[in-house]
Amino acid sequence: MLAATGLPASAQQLNRNEVRGTQLSSEWQHRHGLVTRGPDGKVVFLYGEVQPSVVCSPLQVCDIELQAGEIVRDVLVGDTVRWKVEPATSGAPSGQAIHLIVKPSEPGLVTSMVVTTSRRTYHIQLKSDRTRYMARVGFEYPEDVNARFAEINARVEASVVPGAGVPADQLDFGFRVSGSARWRPTRIYSDGMKTYIQFPSSLSGQDAPVLFVVSGGENRIVNYRMTGSMMVVDYNLDRAILVSGVGRQQQKITIRRKG
C-alpha cells in the first residue's frame, strides 16, 4: 500500500470520490461570495455562503466578531506556531459578543481556522499580508434576516382586521349597536363594499341570528354568509336588525351607521 511506503501525499493516488470531494471543497473555499461593509468599518460576510478569507498583517490585529450571545467551544488553527488567536468580549453580560483577536507573526502565511460555538461552526481561511489587513470582521446570519422578515410580516398581519383582509385604517368602524342578546356583536366595520359583523367566539358553530336590512321603512334580507363567528354581508349597511328566536324568546339587536 502507498501509505506504507512513506511516499508524500502528493505522490499518492486519489480515487474518484476523493478527487470529486476535493474539487467540491475547493469550489466552496475559493468562491467569492458576498462581502459588504458594516458599521464602524466592519467587513461583513454572509455566514455559510463561502469560506471567509480574513487578511491580517504582522504588528496589527484582526478582530473577528461572532454573534452576540454565542458561546465559543473550541478554536482550532492549522498553524499554531505563527498564528496567535486570543479571545475578547464586548457588550452587556446578558448578551456579550465573543471576539477572536488574530495576529500573524510574518507576512505570506496561509492557514485555516475552525471555530465551534453553541450555535454553529465557522470555517475561516487566514492569510497574512505585509501591509494590508482587515481590522474588523463580522457576519450576517440568514436566520436573523428571516427572523426580521417574520417580525415585519407579523406586524403587518396584526394590523389587518380579520375578514376584511385590509389594514384597519382603511375600514369604517362608525356603527352604533343597541339591544341586548347573548350573541351581541363585538365589532362591526365596513370596507365600503361589504360589512363585517363579528360575533362572540361562543357563537361559532351555532345558529346565527337572521339579518334584516332596513330600507324604505321595510325590513328585507340581503346576501350574507357566516365564516366561523364572522358574518360577511354583501352590502354596505346603514341600518339593520339582527333577530333570533320567536315570541318571548326573541332577541333583537339594531345596527345604525353613525353620523
Image: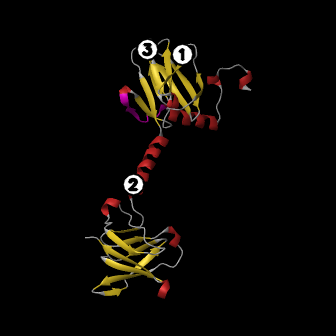
Is residue 246 visible from the viewing direction of this image?
Answer: no
Within the image, what quadrant is residue 189 found in? bottom left
Is residue 113 visible from the viewing direction of this image?
Answer: yes
Pair 3/2: label in front = 2
Q: Which residue is mark 2?
A: 156
Residue 197's place in the image compared with 63, above or below, is below
Mark 3 to mark 1 CA distance (whole Å): 12 Å
Magenta segment? 30-39
Would you call the spot at circle 3 few (<14 residues within 10 Å), some (14-19), or many (20 or more)? some
SS assignment at label 2:
helix
- Residue 110: percent from left, percent from top: 51, 20
Residue occupying image coordinates x 38% and y 33%: 36
Drawn side of residue 227 relative to residue 218, left or right: right
Pair 1/2: label in front = 2
Within the image, what quadrant is residue 117 found in? top right
- Residue 161: percent from left, percent from top: 39, 62
Would you call the spot at circle 1 few (<14 residues within 10 Å), some (14-19), or many (20 or more)? some
Residue 32 within the segment the image draws in magenta: yes
Residue located farthest toward the left when viewing the structure as drawn:
259
Within the image, what quadrant is residue 23 found in? top right
Q: Nearer the viewer, residue 100 or 32?
A: 100
Confirm or deny contact between disc 3 and disc 2 (CB under 8 A).
no
Residue 79's place in the image compared with 203, above or below, is above
Which of marks 1 and 3 precedes in the sequence?
3
Q: What amino acid is found at the position of numbered circle 2 in the picture?
A: Val
Q: Which residue is mark 3?
A: 60
Which of marks 2 and 1 precedes in the sequence?
1
State which quarter of the image contains the N terminus: top right
Mark 1 to mark 2 CA distance (whole Å): 48 Å
Q: What amino acid is found at the position of numbered circle 3 in the picture?
A: Gln
